[in-house]
Structure formats: structure tokens, C-alpha cells
Image: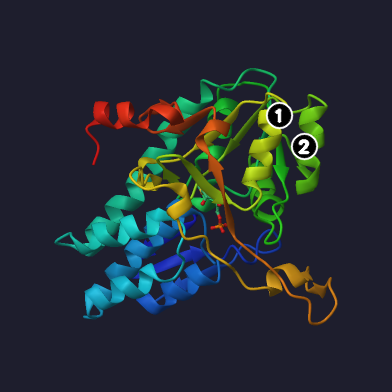
């Protein structure tokens, strides 16, 4: 099973809140179920949110809902990943929302395979690759962006090791990336987020490959902690790559104009169901942070690897937009 399936006019999602303990499913019968799934992170990761949102619009059409109203409601579910907005607008503009959502589902897989192929070129035999959060199959329909690069290099028989940041507070690295890599016997070790700088200082990490929720003209927005990883990588001369599809690009805006989602304080106050701070503690819980272009070595896309300082040239060549 992939991260999601469309079956009998229902969207079936792997319930990522339950992993790694239990592989279970969350069935969306209507667009409201999709909104709940996105808000509560049953489904998460920029490309997966985008495709799930597309199916949400398709469900609304099948139920004869007011599509424009539904589109606004779905867009309000999570503010940061641009794929959500891109997907809703694309399906809304199509003649047949169900067919369009299904097309996007298949495109997502092809795109990730292409990102994987392009990205494998920068991975050398013997590399230890650090990744943050989960930009894997679970963050997409299948295969993954950052973990797609890892998968592709591994399947080319390159001897690689992966290090996953646990990614507090929600633990996407520990719960999802480690689980995903273990399913395929790709060598993986888990570290606390705070150990990444030390390991780079010790020369134990050769490359960083992470995903993005938005690629803007002057950098990227990704899971909270990405900035600290990028700063350490820069200090210790470790190449820092971002793997993202063009559907994550919002290349006319600045990273500083992106809305950064602030999530529930309980994510920080509790760990594994146990309270870890005194009652009444105030919390700041931004879900994402901002990595400026000068800290990024390259952005791996389905169309090739881009120098983040040469976006305009890239888009001119693609005649994208
Ligand atoms: O809050 P999440 O789990 O949705 O955040 C996910 C990330 O930050 C990923 O790195 C990003 O969406 C890229 S997924 C290919």
C-alpha cells in the first residue's frame, strides 16, 4: 500500500500518527475528513498533503458541494506547504476533479523517481547522509524526495548509511523515516536532533539531504530544525542539498513572506504521552523554519539540480510558470 489510495470514491490514508507501532488506515468519505486528516497529521509532508487535498476537492465535487467554498476550507487546513494551494487550484480549474486528482497521484510518483535519479548523482559510494524530518514515501504518494535520493543511490548499489534526526517535537525522523528505511534494509541510525552539529564537526556526515515545504526565490522553508542543520553544515563544509518537486516552488516570493505554522503547545509539553514540563508552562512551537539560499548547495528537482542562486536562469530555461 502506498501512503494513500483512491478506492470506491473514498480516499484511504495510512494513519501516520500511529506509526511505527501500528500500520492502520484512515478513511475519508468526504472533504471534511480530508481536512481533519491534514490538520491532525494523519497525512503530512508537502507532496502528500497536496495530493490528499486534491482528492478532498474531488470528494466535494462528488457530493455536490460548493467547490469554491470547499477549496478555501481545504486551503486553510495547514498554511505552510505550497503544494496544498497548488493542488487545490489545479483540481478546481479542471473539468473532472476526480481524474485530475488521480493524474496528480501518478505524477507525484514519477516526479519522485526522477528526483531520486537526479539526486543519486551527488551521492558517493561510502557516504553517510543526514536527513531531517520525513521527506520519504510517507511524505508523498510513494518513493519520497530526500529519501527518494537515498533509495535511488542504494538501489545503484552505493554503500551508504543514513542518519535520521529524531525531529522533535512530532518525531517524524524517529517514527517515520527510520521505519521507512528499515522496511527496505537501508542502513540507518537515529540521533537526537542536538547531536547533528557534533557529528558534522567530527567528520561523520558527508552530505545532508532534506525536503522542503516551500522553495522561494531566496531559500527554502522546511521542518523546524532545518536551519540549525544548515548552519552546522555550512560551518563544517558539509554539502547541504534540498530535494523538492517543482510543485513545491513558489519562486516569486521571499521565504520571509511565508506563513510559518504554529502548532499545538501539547506537542512540546508531552513526550510519549507523558508531560515533560511544569503545568502552566508557556510554549513556542513553530512547525517550520527558514534556510536562506547561501546555506544551500543545490536543489534537486525532477528537472535537474539547481544552484539556488540561479533560479531565474533555471525557470527561463524551463519556461516554467
Ligand atoms: O509537519 P510535516 O511533517 O508535514 O513536515 C514535513 C516536512 O517538513 C518535510 O520535510 C517536507 O514537507 C517535505 S516532504 C517531501
Asked if residue 206 is positioned above or below residue 141 in the image, the reply reads above
Q: What quarter of the picture does the C terminus occupy?
A: top left
Q: Dot 1: what SS?
A: helix
Asked if residue 180 is positioned above or below residue 236 in the image, the reply reads below
From the top left corner, tell me how far across and down residue 132 is, in percent: 64, 44
Residue ID for mark 1? 235
* In the displayed structure image, the side of residue 35 where residue 127 appears, left or right: right
Q: CA distance from mark 2 to mark 1?
A: 9 Å
Q: Dot 2: what SS?
A: helix
Query: Which residue occupies 79% across, 82% down?
Result: 280
Q: Are marks 2 and 1 in contact (CB under 8 Å)?
A: yes
Residue 302 picture quarter:
top left
Residue 85 picture quarter:
bottom left
Residue ID for mark 2? 197
From the top left corner, tell me how far across and down residue 70 is, in percent: 30, 76
Label 2 Cα crowd, 10 Å radius (few <14 / some 14-19 / many 20+): some
On the question of residue 2 being in view, the answer is no
Front residue of this view, candidates 187 and 225: 225
Image mark for residue 298: none
Amino acid at each position: 500500500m502506498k501512503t494513500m489510495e483512491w478506492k470506491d470514491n473514498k480516499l484511504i490514508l495510512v494513519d501516520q500518527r500511529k506509526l511505527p507501532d501500528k500500520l492502520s488506515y484512515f478513511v475519508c468519505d468526504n472533504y471534511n475528513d480530508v481536512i481533519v486528516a491534514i490538520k491532525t497529521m494523519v497525512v503530512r509532508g508537502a507532496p502528500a498533503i497536496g495530493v490528499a487535498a486534491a482528492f478532498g476537492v474531488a470528494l466535494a465535487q462528488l457530493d455536490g458541494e460548493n467547490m469554491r467554498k470547499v477549496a478555501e476550507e481545504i486551503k486553510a487546513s495547514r498554511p505552510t506547504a505550497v503544494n496544498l494551494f497548488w493542488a487545490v487550484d489545479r483540481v478546481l480549474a479542471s473539468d473532472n476533479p476526480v481524474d485530475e486528482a488521480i493524474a496528480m497521484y501518478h505524477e507525484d510518483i514519477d516526479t519522485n523517481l526522477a528526483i531520486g535519479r537526479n539526486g543519486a548523482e551527488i551521492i558517493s559510494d561510502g557516504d553517510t547522509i543526514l536527513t531531517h524530518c520525513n521527506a520519504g514515501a510517507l511524505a508523498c504518494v510513494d518513493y519520497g524526495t530526500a529519501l527518494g535520493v537515498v533509495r535511488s543511490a542504494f538501489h545503484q548499489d552505493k554503500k551508504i548509511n543514513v542518519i535520521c534526526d529524531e525531529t522533535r517535537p512530532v518525531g517524524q525522523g524517529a517514527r517515520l523515516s527510520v521505519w521507512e528505511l528499515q522496511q527496505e534494509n537501508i542502513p540507518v541510525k537515529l540521533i537526537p536532533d542536538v547531536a547533528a552539529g557534533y557529528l558534522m564537526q567530527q567528520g561523520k556526515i558527508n552530505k545532508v539531504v532534506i525536503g522542503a515545504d516551500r522553495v522561494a526565490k531566496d531559500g527554502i522553508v522546511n521542518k523546524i530544525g532545518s536551519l540549525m542543520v544548515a548552519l552546522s553544515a555550512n560551518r563544517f563544509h558539509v554539502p547541504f542539498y534540498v530535494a523538492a518537486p517543482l510543485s513545491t516552488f513558489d519562486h516569486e516570493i521571499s521565504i520571509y513572506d511565508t506563513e510559518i505554522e504554529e502548532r499545538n503547545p501539547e506537542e512540546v509539553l508531552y513526550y510519549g504521552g507523558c508531560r515533560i514540563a511544569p503545568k502552566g508552562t508557556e510554549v513556542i512551537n513553530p512547525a517550520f523554519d527558514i534556510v536562506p539560499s547561501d546555506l544551500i548547495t543545490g536543489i534537486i528537482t525532477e528537472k535537474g539540480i539547481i544552484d539556488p542562486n540561479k533560479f531565474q536562469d533555471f525557470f527561463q530555461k524551463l519556461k516554467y510558470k
